[in-house]
Amino acid sequence: MKERKKIRYGWHPAEYAIGENEKYYGEMAAKGWRLTKRGQHLSRFEKDSPQKSRYRIEMSAPAFLDEDQTLPEEQVALYEECGWKLVTSYRLMHVFVANEGSDAPEFYQQPEQQAATLKALRREYIWGLVPLVFYLTLDVLVVLAIWGRSVTWEPVIDLRMGIVQMTGLFLLILFLVHWSLYRLLYGAYRTLRMYRELKKGIPLDHAPKGRHRVRNGVYILFGVFSIAAGAATLVQVVSSYGEELSADAQAPYLLLQDMGLFDLGESVYPSNREHPVEYTESLLAKQWYVYEASGEEWMYQDIYEMPNEDMAVWMAETLLENSVFAEGKEEYQRVEIEGLRCAWQTDLEFVAVQGNRAYYITYSMWRHSGGMSPLEALARKENQAV
């Protein structure tokens, strides 16, 4: 039976780090791992006897919009005649190897000549900066969503709601986007610096000793923050649950009977959802989404328990702009009700702040039932609970 080859994968340096890649592959060969293939992030190695090898990387330089990234056959043939063997290629990068101590010459005697091979890589990074507009727009929207209290632009309101409802997921996306931005900017900087040095006649260092602690530290921070945000998102999803309505006075939501329309126990709770009460908790808010119906009457409630009262007011102002029927705060009537810090209402929608909770209630029959409004019922419920 043919013995199965041992294979392992390693996380290689980015393509702009030519010298670091050459050093990395040489060190792996000395440990008995021979490079067989390079991918976007990982390199594939096969177990072999330890050997000292020299690795060199050549970058192809296709013209603008030319999709062919291979090296010309005659160039590969020339390198192989000189003692270099092409091991693997990935996009613009082509990896050659020669035994340590062989008379295989360096690809370039003049650094200025090698600078020309970086034109395509440099062009890719420059064009890669085009999405910088997207990154800056996202950052502006985030700043407006968090601190732009008076901003009522719909994308900002939607983002603000998302931050509260799924804080962990929002942070995860934010960290990953800015991690990508950092990698892009750093890669562009390293490529342009390498190009300038080669143009000045400074040869490429094939065995750099720098540890790039700042870069690695930034990567670690992004990684830790992303893992933490991802864990918070997972915990929120796993811990979310649905339950039946409760007449307990400690429950944060109202029942139709609280409007004085039913005696205790006479209300029924058919629901078009699996559970009439859905609960979830993000890093910013405990949240209840409640639906109750009885005959022609129905009531929806979105309740957000924020870290403090000021944030509850901030959330209530967001809910005014995120209403289903009203176009914004200007369509609401401000009302003063004892027991509520602030409250607004229309014919169908009600927004209130009670303690550190922000309420958004949609109720169908207030003007026609003769009962009290949800805002009055909310204030009375709080007094009864106390």
Image (tube, rainbow, N blue to C red):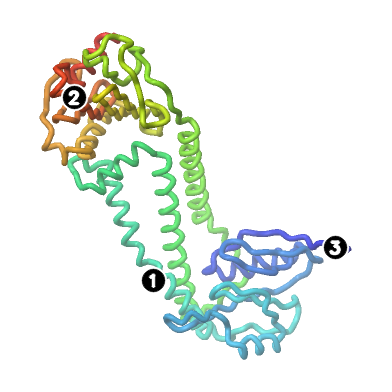
For mark 1, what is the residue?
A: 127
- Tell me if label 1 and label 3 are in contact, CB under 8 Å: no
Does 312 sit left or right of 17 as displayed? left
* Vertical position of residue 114 compared to residue 138: above or below: below
What residue would you read off at disc 2? 365
Q: Nearer the viewer, mark 1 or mark 2?
A: 2
Quadrant of the image for the C terminus?
top left
SS label for mark 3: loop
**Upstream in the sequence, badge 3 or badge 2?**
3
Name the residue nearer the viewer: 156 or 363: 363
**Image x and y of residue 116, in percent:** 49, 83
Identify which amino acid the numbered label 1 is placed on. Answer: Trp
Q: Quadrant of residue 304?
A: top left
- Location of residue 153 in the rendering, given as x and y in whole percent from the top left corner: 20, 47
Label at residue 3: 3
* Amino acid type indicated by mark 2: Met
Count residues near mark 3 (Cα–Cα under 10 Å), then give few for <14, some for 14-19, many for 20+: few
Q: Residue at x 75, y 62 (%)?
A: 31
Disc 2 element? loop
- Residue 157 in the image: state x and y as whole percent: 25, 43
- N-terminal-most mark, 1 or 3: 3
* Mark 3 residue type: Glu
Neighbour tally class for label 2: few under 14, some 14-19, many 20 plus, Cα within 10 Å = some
Please rate how many residues cluster around mark 1, counting C-alpha atoms within 10 Å: few if below 14, some from 14 to 19, many from 20. few
